[in-house]
């Protein structure tokens, strides 16, 4: 037997011996047959005592992010650090980023887009147009859409904030690979898809080829145990996490959110969490799809009948590799506030004493969904916004707007003394609908509190959940909801 | 490629609102964006730049938004190259895609002082602090990215 070549495949708890050299394909096929899916095989050679040759096919699991990236690339196996070209299921741009992408597209002389049903152009940032130049930029989106027959162009009146609108319409689905020329494209990871913010040139390239380049990211797993306290939301979990790891704590990495506390969250809360993955520097935020996800997606498909209806549920393998695993006792997390001028400057709200505010904004791609407005209305119902404070409520989409009207939330806001606006990114990035003056201070349910983000370079933005924002509007200073309800 | 200029030093987490505040995003004209470059963190920065100058910054340069207006503004202001301890990922890919040379090198980013004369050789990953008489070596770009850089940006690289 000493001359006989042996080949072995080793996995978790099992191994197979071959008497002929298996190719990587045979080995992969065989292991799949044994019930493994998306196995990551790395071939290493070693020699046993008899001089026979052993091939150890070390079985390594994939994370959900790796699985989706692999399924969209030509690579048989991938690992963090690899560069790949990946097929894009859906891509999007807005009135800030798409004009540059359109210019770039035209400059290459390209005649048509790769697939007119897989592109969305959404004028949501400076619309309804805040000035002439913004109007010209929004017009470029309309004209490009008309010229190329882009199916998903959303005019003011049918428009919503892109990252609330696309999931609502069932246009981004579990297992998809989505890119958007907007940093908060990472929001859709809540559906169990890989979605990542890119630049305008990336978008132009995707318009042409339907592909995008990626460096396969390492993943960090965040596990949230326990039951959330009253008034604690997805927003509080993500602010707390960014406070823990810092604004570059997940740089270039995938943030995978899991644990019983995540399982119990609504889709709206999950969107808030994945939305802010970029604020920790991450390439994507992602949550394994479950019954909550499937229910949400099926309802969206039923209601809006998108062309693409099939989706795929991916889960991380048990033996997937992570750069780090962070575990939190979510039952101990208090409602959070991010103090100026970084999202990572977090503090429990009850430690933020006597911070008086001039403005409150409830809305944005982070917290402008219906359950966000419901919570805010619950806090505000029958009460008045403090004299000297401006409360601006911005539903994220027309559907959210209509639902808020139907449920009587709009009435609660207006009677409390708030502005109830048409959907727009508006003040979040200092565009319009609530720009801060010198020295003014705002608490907002948005995602960034960089200096000057919402207006004057000497203004301040505090980030919080809709409940904390609404409570603060009533008191005129940053407050815990339990102080007012 | 080789670049030579004076260093303009910035701290950590220089975000895209610092580089080009959103109030200027209703245009995409490079010259106009260039005039407002870094206005969120330093007034009149563009006036202080001599063509070819180099930005030297701390960690996580370019964090925040995906706006390509940021690398466009920096180039239009006359900056030839950026050295930082680390870059935010969308800014990094925007720079690669649009042909703005950037180098991640912690030692150089820490060692170089404001107004130092700096020479950068991106092909060999060598940074020389002429004023401080020091030389630093940075890692080379992975071959995949070198291809994009050599072609002069992503859109040239995808031409079939």
Image (tube, helix red, strand yellow):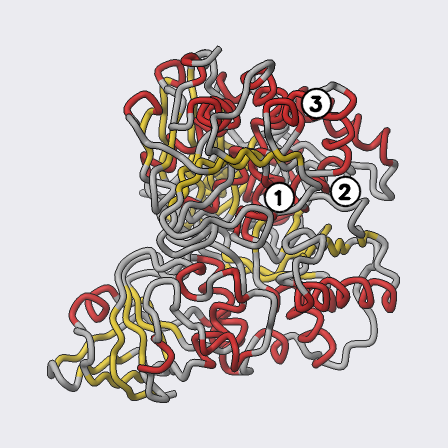
Left or right of B109? Residue A313 is right
Q: Position of residue A180 (x, y in %)?
A: 63, 54
Disc 1: which chain?
A
Residue A208, placed above or below residue B50? above
Outermost residue toward the left? B133
Disc 2: which chain?
A
Q: Quadrant of residue A279?
A: top left
Marks 3, 1 in one chain: yes
Q: Which residue is mark 3?
A: A411
Which element is circle 2 on? loop
Q: Which residue is mark 2?
A: A171
Q: Do the residues under discs 2 and 1 have CB atoms within 8 angstroms?
A: no
Dot 2 or dot 1: first in sequence order is 1
Residue A68, numbered label? 1
Marks 2, 1 in one chain: yes
Name the residue rendered at 36%, 61% in the picture.
B61
In this view, the mark in front (2 or 1) = 2
Residue A57, placed above or below residue A16? below
Q: Position of residue A322 (x, y in %)?
A: 41, 38
Q: Do the residues under discs 3 and 1 have CB atoms within 8 angstroms?
A: no
Instruction: Measure the alpha-carbon separation of dots 2 and 3.
Output: 31 Å
Disc 3: which chain?
A
Name the residue rendered at 17%, 73% in the picture.
B113
């Amino acid at each position: 037997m000493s001359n006989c070549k042996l080949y072995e495949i080793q996995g978790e708890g099992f191994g197979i011996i071959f008497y002929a050299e298996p190719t990587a394909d045979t080995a992969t096929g065989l292991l799949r047959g044994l019930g493994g899916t998306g196995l990551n095989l790395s071939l290493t050679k070693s020699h046993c005592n008899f001089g026979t040759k052993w091939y150890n096919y070390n079985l390594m699991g994939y994370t959900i992010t790796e699985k989706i990236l692999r399924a969209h690339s030509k690579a048989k196996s991938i690992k963090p650090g690899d560069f790949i070209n990946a097929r894009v299921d859906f891509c999007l741009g807005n009135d800030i980023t798409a004009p540059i992408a359109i210019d770039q597209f035209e400059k290459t002389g390209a005649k048509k887009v790769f697939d007119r049903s897989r592109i969305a152009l959404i004028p949501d940032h400076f619309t309804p147009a805040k000035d002439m130049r913004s109007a010209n930029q929004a017009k470029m989106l309309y004209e490009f859409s008309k010229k190329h027959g882009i199916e998903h162009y959303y005019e003011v009146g049918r428009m919503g904030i892109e990252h609330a609108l696309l999931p609502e319409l069932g246009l981004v689905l579990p297992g998809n690979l989505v890119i958007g020329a907007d940093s908060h494209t990472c929001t859709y990871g809540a559906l169990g898809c890989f979605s990542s913010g890119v630049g305008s040139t990336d978008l132009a390239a995707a318009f042409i080829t339907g592909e995008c380049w990626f460096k396969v990211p390492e993943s960090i797993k965040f596990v949230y145990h326990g039951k959330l306290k009253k008034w604690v939301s997805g927003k509080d979990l993500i602010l707390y996490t960014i406070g823990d790891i810092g604004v570059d704590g997940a740089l270039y990495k995938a943030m995978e959110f899991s644990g019983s506390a995540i399982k119990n969250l609504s889709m709206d809360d999950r969107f808030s969490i994945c939305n802010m993955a970029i604020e920790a520097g991450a390439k994507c935020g992602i949550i394994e799809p479950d019954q909550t996800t499937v229910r949400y997606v099926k309802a969206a498909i039923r209601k809006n009948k998108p062309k693409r209806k099939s989706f795929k549920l991916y889960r991380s393998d048990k033996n997937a590799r992570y750069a780090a695993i962070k575990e939190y006792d979510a039952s101990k997390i208090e409602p959070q506030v991010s103090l100026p001028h970084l999202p990572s400057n977090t503090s429990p709200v009850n430690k933020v004493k006597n911070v008086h505010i001039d403005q409150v904004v409830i809305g944005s791609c982070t917290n402008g969904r219906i359950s966000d407005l419901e919570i805010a209305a619950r806090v505000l119902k029958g009460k008045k916004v403090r004299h000297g404070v401006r409360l601006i409520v911005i539903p994220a989409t027309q559907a959210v707007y209509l639902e808020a009207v139907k449920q009587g939330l709009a009435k609660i806001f207006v009677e409390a003394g708030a502005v109830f606006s048409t959907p727009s990114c508006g003040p979040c990035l200092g565009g319009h609908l609530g720009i801060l003056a010198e020295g003014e201070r705002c608490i907002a349910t948005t995602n960034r509190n960089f200096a000057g983000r919402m207006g004057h370079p000497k203004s301040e933005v505090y980030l919080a959940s809709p409940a904390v924002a609404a409570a603060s509007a009533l008191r005129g200073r940053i407050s815990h909801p339990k102080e007012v309800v | 490629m080789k670049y030579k200029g004076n260093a303009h030093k910035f701290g950590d987490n220089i975000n895209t609102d610092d580089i080009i505040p959103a109030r200027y995003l209703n245009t995409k004209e490079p010259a106009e964006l260039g005039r407002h470059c870094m206005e969120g963190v330093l007034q009149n920065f563009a006036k202080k730049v001599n063509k070819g100058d180099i930005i030297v910054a701390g960690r996580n340069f370019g964090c925040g938004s995906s706006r390509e207006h940021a690398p466009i503004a920096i180039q239009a202001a006359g900056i030839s190259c950026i050295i930082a301890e680390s870059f935010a990922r969308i800014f990094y890919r925007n720079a690669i895609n649009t042909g703005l040379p950037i180098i991640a090198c912690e030692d150089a980013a820490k060692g170089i002082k404001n107004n130092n004369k700096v020479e950068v050789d991106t092909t060999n990953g060598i940074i020389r602090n002429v004023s401080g008489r020091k030389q630093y070596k940075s890692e080379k770009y992975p071959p995949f990215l070198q291809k994009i850089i050599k072609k002069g940006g992503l859109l040239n690289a995808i031409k079939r």
